[in-house]
Image (cartoon, rainbow, N blue to C red):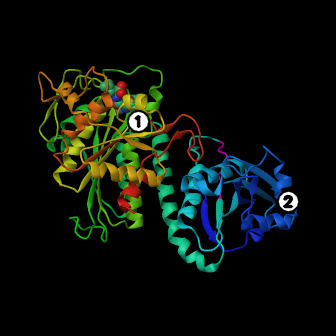
Amino acid sequence: MPRLALSPVPPERADADLLVLPVAAGEGGPVAPPVTAAVLGRLGADLAAVAGGAGRFTGQLDDVLLLPGYGAVAAPAVLLVGVGPDGQRSPETLRRAAAVAVAAAGKAATLAVALHRAGGPDGAALAAVAEGTLLAAYRFQRHKSAPDPDLAAVTLLVDGEGSLDAAGPVLRRAEVAARATLAARDLVNEPASRINPATLAAEAVRLARAAGLEHRVLAGSALRRGRFGAVVAVGGGSATGPRLVELRYRPGSGSRSGSLGAARHVALVGKGVTFDTGGIDLKRGAGMDGMKDDMAGAAAILAAITAAAELGLPTAVTAILPLVENMPGASAMRPGDVVTARNGLTVEVTNTDAEGRLILADGLALAAEARPDAILDLATLTGSVVYGLGLGCVGVFGNTPALTAEVLDAAGRAGELACELPLIEDYRRFLDSEVADLVNATNEPGDSVQAALFLREFVAGVPWAHLDIAGPATAKEARYYQPKGASGWGVRTLLAFLEGPR
Ligand code: BES
Ligand code: MN
Ligand code: ZN
């Protein structure tokens, strides 16, 4: 991740490979805000003239114009970046404009970015530009023998020493959120040959130690003794046995046990299938490589709880991460097997590829035992939600309208797209089994809804929201601050949620 700094230096004196300046879109063409107009003045450049008349550089989002510095400013080149019409500016526009700037910056190693508004810093704008820049500059190059050089440093120019003090915490929050998102992307992008239940649990412990979180990892006989029958069954086919990771963040103290002193206690349960072959109900080959992202829920939660600790958020958080590899091994669970989940409910495994809801059943049951104020689960749970909502949007189900609304609001503030989907009571009957309490999969359409209804059986009435992130967990194509590959979806939504409503 590039180094991020604040500086009160005026743009013309900023020392960087590229000076980035905002330009708005006006009725009759591009409009330079004062900060940009001052630099253009030094360059002797008339904006209307360099913009090239109608249809060239208009100041709309996606528009960029590169100008030489001509020695009139410290930076060798100046990049004008469209931020759209004044009336339509939002944090999302600014995150996107920052990403457009990063893409246009090409091989520049250092950027100095002037913010649109002069005077005291607009915290939301500063955070958006910082986040957009850091998220856009991400590349997963660990396995390249000749990686491209990364963007090294970004300086955000705020005018006046006084505004630096106010901007500091805003920038730090954006930086922690972005770094956590990138950490989640790294875990998801990493192939399943490196990330398995054992290595992911080890990584969780490493992060927990660094962040001062209480942590516990269950494996082998401890999982059986703990009655995590579903996790044990799903993980049975892999050469790397299942793990259950539990992490605790308690505000104000690294070691306090209850939720004393916290505004509230939230349990986060993340699907951690490090690779999903489908098991004995084997998936087809085409696209199976994408199933290394089936632990994206666990990765987002791991990143979010460590970031929550770094930021000292006022919410007590318990993270529960069931980690398995769904493989068709000699000791794999079979179709027709019956497993007993942590809360005593029995499940007939009608499809070994519906493994996510099985391991979440154990995780949710454990989460509910502590009677937290809310349980959120994140899971790349169903292909069905991708058919329904496409790749861009997460489906949110909940048993408590106020909590669902809070989750949707947090996603909105984070700039992550989510919409509510219904728990259709009429479909509950499809989950009845002839030999056990429940089946894990049916042949009825509407699998996302049925999966959510299945999960609800394990939350013991605790307010709960289920986020099916199967669509946006991985991006098929690069778009603004989302490069192709893992998105880290949910890290910023969870942080916004844990910060509480604004
Ligand atoms: N991890 C998959 C869900 C998934 C599918 C995510 C495609 C992203 C893209 C999950 O474990 C799964 O295999 N679900 C099955 C359920 C079915 C067997 C009832 C599915 O959606 O096909
Ligand atoms: Mn599956
Ligand atoms: Zn899966």
- Extreme bottom residue here? 162
Callout 2 crowding tier (Cα within 10 Å): few <14, some 14–19, many ≥20: few
Tell me the residue at 42%/50% (across/down): 411
Instruction: Answer with left or right where residue 42 lies relative to residue 5.
Output: right
The answer to whether the residues at label 1 and label 2 have Cβ atoms under 8 Å apart is: no
Q: Mark 2 points at which residue?
A: 46
Figure quadrant of the C terminus: bottom left
Q: Where is residue 71 in the image (x, y as percent from the top left)?
A: 87, 65
Callout 1 crowding tier (Cα within 10 Å): few <14, some 14–19, many ≥20: many
Tell me the residue at 23%/35% (across/down): 453
Is there any visible trace of residue 207 in the rendered image? no
> Mark 2 falls on what kind of element?
loop
Q: Where is residue 187 in the image (x, y as percent from the top left)?
A: 45, 45
- Per the image, is 151 magenta? yes
Residue 454 against residue 501 in the figure, above or below? above
Depth check: give the residue in front, 56 or 331: 56
Tell me which corner region of the image, top left, top right, bottom left or bottom right, holds residue 413.
bottom left
The magenta-colored residue range is 146-152
Tell me which corner region of the image, top left, top right, bottom left or bottom right, holds residue 480.
top right
Instruction: Answer with left or right where residue 81 lies relative to residue 494.
Output: right
Q: Mark 1 points at which residue?
A: 470
